[in-house]
Image (cartoon, rainbow, N blue to C red):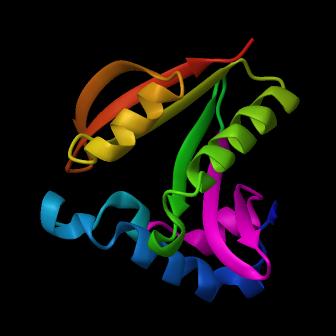
């Protein structure tokens, strides 16, 4: 059984290891570290934006949610490679949708690098639709949204 809870500073080293494991293989594909590898996770923790998914007492996933004026941004969802294919990414996205509704938003927005084709396919399968492609901060990003009624 998995559980999701807010992150705290004592989780920081484990979070950084998870992010490295989850995104490290994209460095060669993109040509540089993906944005999530450069994030300030201590700041996300302090702002209450970061939630962690555990199985037993092992950290296997995380989600970063950022409130904006008219939407919630699903800034990061990551699952450790050892746990991929078990539905944990879907569980984290379902959590993000539920949290988004609870705080009063109807729109969940995310972006991913265009080279992360596995992520694009998963998000489309889960009901997200592409709304634009841009180059920002040196990355070719695909923005997607899901309306939550």
Residue 140 as seen in the image, left or right of residue 41: left
Observer-nearest of 53 and 45? 53
Q: Position of residue 145 (x, y in %)?
A: 50, 22
Residue 55 is covered by the magenta coloring: yes
Q: Is residue 117 above or below residue 57?
A: above
Q: Residue at horizontal 79%, vertical 78%? A: 56
Q: Quadrant of residue 113?
A: top left
Q: Is residue 128 left or right of residue 69?
A: left
Q: Position of residue 82 (x, y in %)?
A: 49, 75
Any part of residue 31 in sight: no
Quadrant where the C terminus sits is: top right
Q: Quadrant of residue 108?
A: top right
Please report the residue visible at 28 percent of the width from the left and 38 percent of the height from the top. 141
**Residues shaded magenta:** 38-66
Compared with 52, 121 (above or below) is above
For image coordinates 57% across by 41% down, the residue present is 74
- Furthest-right residue in view? 102
Q: Nearer the viewer, residue 61 or 133?
A: 61
Whether residue 74 is situated above or below residue 60 in the rendered picture: above
Q: Which image quarter holds the N terminus?
A: bottom right
Q: Nearer the viewer, residue 75 or 147?
A: 147
Is residue 51 shown in magenta? yes
Q: Position of residue 83 (x, y in %)?
A: 54, 68
How many numbered marks does the figure carry? 0
């Amino acid at each position: 059984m998995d559980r999701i809870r807010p992150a705290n500073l004592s989780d920081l080293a484990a979070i950084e290891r998870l992010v490295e494991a989850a995104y490290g293989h994209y460095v060669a594909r993109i040509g540089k570290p993906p944005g999530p590898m450069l994030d300030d996770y201590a700041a996300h923790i302090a702002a209450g934006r970061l939630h962690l998914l555990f199985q037993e007492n092992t950290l296997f996933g995380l989600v970063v949610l950022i409130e904006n004026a008219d939407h919630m941004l699903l800034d990061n969802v990551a699952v450790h490679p050892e746990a991929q294919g078990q539905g944990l990414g879907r569980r984290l996205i379902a959590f993000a949708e539920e949290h988004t509704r609870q705080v009063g938003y109807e729109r969940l927005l995310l972006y991913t690098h265009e080279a992360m084709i596995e992520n694009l396919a998963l998000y489309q399968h889960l009901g997200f639709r592409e709304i634009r492609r841009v180059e920002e901060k040196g990355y070719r990003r695909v923005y997607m949204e899901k309306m939550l009624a």
